Amino acid sequence: MSRITLLRSPLSLLTVPLVLAGSITQSAPVAAQSESRGVLEEVVVTARRRAENLQDTPIAVSAVGSETLERLGISDIEDVETLAPSLQFSQTNYKAPAIFIRGIGQRSGNPVLDPGVGMYLNGVYVPRSDAQLLDAVDVENIQVLRGPQGTLFGKNNIGGAILVDSKKPHSDEFELAAKMTLGSHGRKNAKLSSNIPLTDDLALRLAINAKRSDGSIDNVNADNALFDQDRMAVSGRMLWYATETLEVDLFGFLSRIDERGSPYNCKFQNSGAILTKGIYRDANGSNLKEACDLSDSLAGDFKVSQNDEDARYAIDNHMAALTLRWPMWGMDVESISSYALQDNIAISGDSDGTGIHIVAVGPDAGRQVFDGAGLSTPDQQRTQFTQELKFNGSAWDETLNYTFGAFFARETLDDTLDGTDVGDNGLVAVGPDAAVDLGIPLPNNSVLPVQANAAQNANYENKTKAVFAQASWDMASWFQVTLGVRYTEEERSSEHTQITPDYVEYGNRLNAQIGSDPAIVQPVAHYQDGIYSPVSLQQYFAYQAPQVPLVFAEPLVGDTRFSEVTPNLTLTYLATDDTLEALNLDSFIVYGTISKGFKSGGLDIRNTQTSANIQQFEPELVTNKELGFKLDALDSRVRFNVAVFQMDYTDLQVALYERGATATEVIQFTGNAGEAVVDGFELELTALLGDFTINANAGYTDGDLVEYSLGTNTADGFAVVDRSGEAFPQVPQNVRGLVVRYDWFSDLGIISPQLQYYYSDEIFIGTDYLSGEYESSVISQYELYNARLAWEVNDQLSVTAFVDNIKDAPYFVGGIAVTSVIGVANRVPGTPRQAGLEFSYRF
């Protein structure tokens, strides 16, 4: 169990232990801390599935408590990015961010892929990356575990794990707290939380968090702005001591998100890409390059030009978990059972990033394809059941501490819709240049009509079974050996239904319009793929785009199984009292770790240029070698933690955008891509200097693609392309952060100004074999300055003013370049300067 601790001083009420060294803080009356002002308190973490002092735990872990979250105004999990080195929440194709730790993650939202970083809410694994954007509703602490967590956690997490624990109810007293935030761009947030003692043995916590904002990135092509917020989350937790030995912990979480998708500033790259050759029937224009150049010109003003319907982010999350704790045979036993459901899913990205409806991809694009056919869209639904049984114990006068248990998970994804909606309900045209490439003669002032819509409906079932054990043996007062192992079996089955237009019938529907407009005089015939015989440009623009008849292919069914043993060995030196005295330190450990991580493979549909079938991709494997130390010094006023690592990364799972089976089709496919080596280091520092608190962190991640050869559909046919010279995707090489806070204890209360700085290096956003040839596939480095001024009037009332992005300088936080098929790099802009006020009151 992780408990929030505090600084033993008045500083603890308002200091900001970013805890780049991992400090977790908790509010307490000022008078209770004044005697030991300026001392870093012990931090308790659960990185090894038991409560331990952070500074004695030989794992690279950052921990952030509820007070720190409040001090920094953090209400979204993704904002923790600035507090922990080597952690990135990367914006790619959809609004839901992809999580990376030490360069390892998964940027695709494809449901065949597991995330590379595990997210756990009260010990329950959250399986889908687009459901990991959890609002910090009633959070006790957040722990970021860096490096493979392949032994003790419910799913193997090759990059690391993020543990989110909500506040536990207690029977001591009734509590009620309210917080309201008002700010720029129509921001209105409200949060209400309470602790309700029901009996001496039964207590309840309830919390609700609502967020609204108009959006901070203006869309000049619509009367709205992006990065809007419209979400609500509710959590409840009940703790019942049913007997003297049995603890019953019931948790529920509900959230609803219904927002516009990510903003994009388009940068044109490749005039030879399939979609750049299209002539589009849109009120905002017909040419992708012109629309993309307009979008690019708006980047310096925090504006975009996007199609209003092509980017959505909507999802409902439901979770219930029952945790039982009791002693048995001298051990502490914990059973965690959970059920989760996601529905009302409408997620898509405006993949061209322009004001023209050129191409949208994702579940909501699949809905557009069904709507364009006059069909009802199947209701996508995801469910997950998990069960874990864990035993903690000790032996030999507590010199041996051990944990063992078993884990099971079953996840089903029903009616998982994906689609590509192109042009005017799939109707586009190509001109002379494309016609030459296709070998089709084209008369003057003529174009080739094309029908380019496609969709896929799939059902998935994923099962995970695992047993695990880990033991730490204090062989001497100064030396500890930790050995762990996990055996995992993964079963994957899927059923994919490919949905394509009935090209002949679609041609008949075009021809049925002959005579309905003076320009429509010439019949068309299906020529090949989705391409029709030439018509005049005037006739093409005169068509009314008809409903698209769809053909549902026979389902492609497959199943597969993977298994892996993932061991962990850690050697730890703990300095003795004599050593600490000689070094003038308060605590000091050095540890070395060798560990292995595993992420399941799976099945995906691939349309090669000769066939469509289910193909298997293999598991990812990571071997991590790490050396680190942790120390407290200067009478526990300074905490400094360092980790150096090297990871051998094999069979990288890569999501590719490529040409499909036809000349007009764009598909996404998952494959494996050889080997990589990731080197790096991390620094975390917390220092208390009088009334100042200084927190700093820095991370360096250098990923090298040693072998990276992929078979892909190119303009010249299927070929194996060597991409080992590419930069490591989606991960900045250098990141660093700094927070400086001063606490002034005045007669009017505690007044605390605070300045926060964050720097991120450049990021490679390419996805396919051509992306590395363009400078625009790299977004530049950026830095941010945020400021807060907090006034704690008394123990009940506090008021905070804040300004984010003080410099108001444009920057990009992520993106995706799909160079070979769309021909553009889409870059996600950061938010402009924002200001506001927060009001908090504790009853």
Image: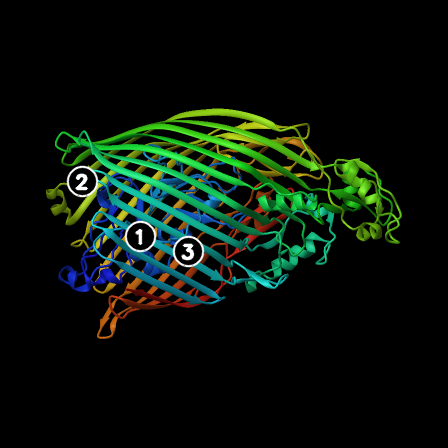
In this view, 323 is above or below 267: above
Residue at image position (43%, 44%) is 100
Q: Which residue is mark 3?
A: 759
- In the rendered image, which quarter contains the N terminus? top left
The residue lying furthest to the front in this view is: 199
Tag 3 secondary structure: strand
Tell me what residue is drawn at x 47 percent, y 54 percent: 781
Q: Give the CA separation, mark 3 to mark 1.
A: 37 Å
Specify whether residue 712 is in view: no
Q: Secondary structure at mark 2?
A: loop
Q: Amino acid at mark 1?
A: Arg
The quadrant holding residue 47 is top left
Mark 2–mark 1 Cα distance, whole angstroms, equals 21 Å
* Disc sitting over residue 205 in the figure: 1
The chosen color scheme is rainbow
480 left or right, relative to 725:
left
C-alpha distance separating marks 2 and 3: 51 Å
The amino acid marked with disc number 3 is Tyr
- Of the residues under marks 2 and 1, which one precedes in the sequence? 1
Q: Residues within 10 Å of mark 1 (few under 14, many from 20)?
A: many
Q: Nearer the viewer, mark 3 or mark 1?
A: 1
378 in relation to 349, above or below: above
The three-letter amino acid code for the residue at tag 2 is Glu
The spot of residue 627 in percent (x, y) is 29, 38
Q: Residues within 10 Å of mark 2 (few under 14, many from 20)?
A: few
**Residue marked by disc 2:** 244
Say above or below: 203 vs 341.
below
Q: Residues within 10 Å of mark 3 (few under 14, many from 20)?
A: some
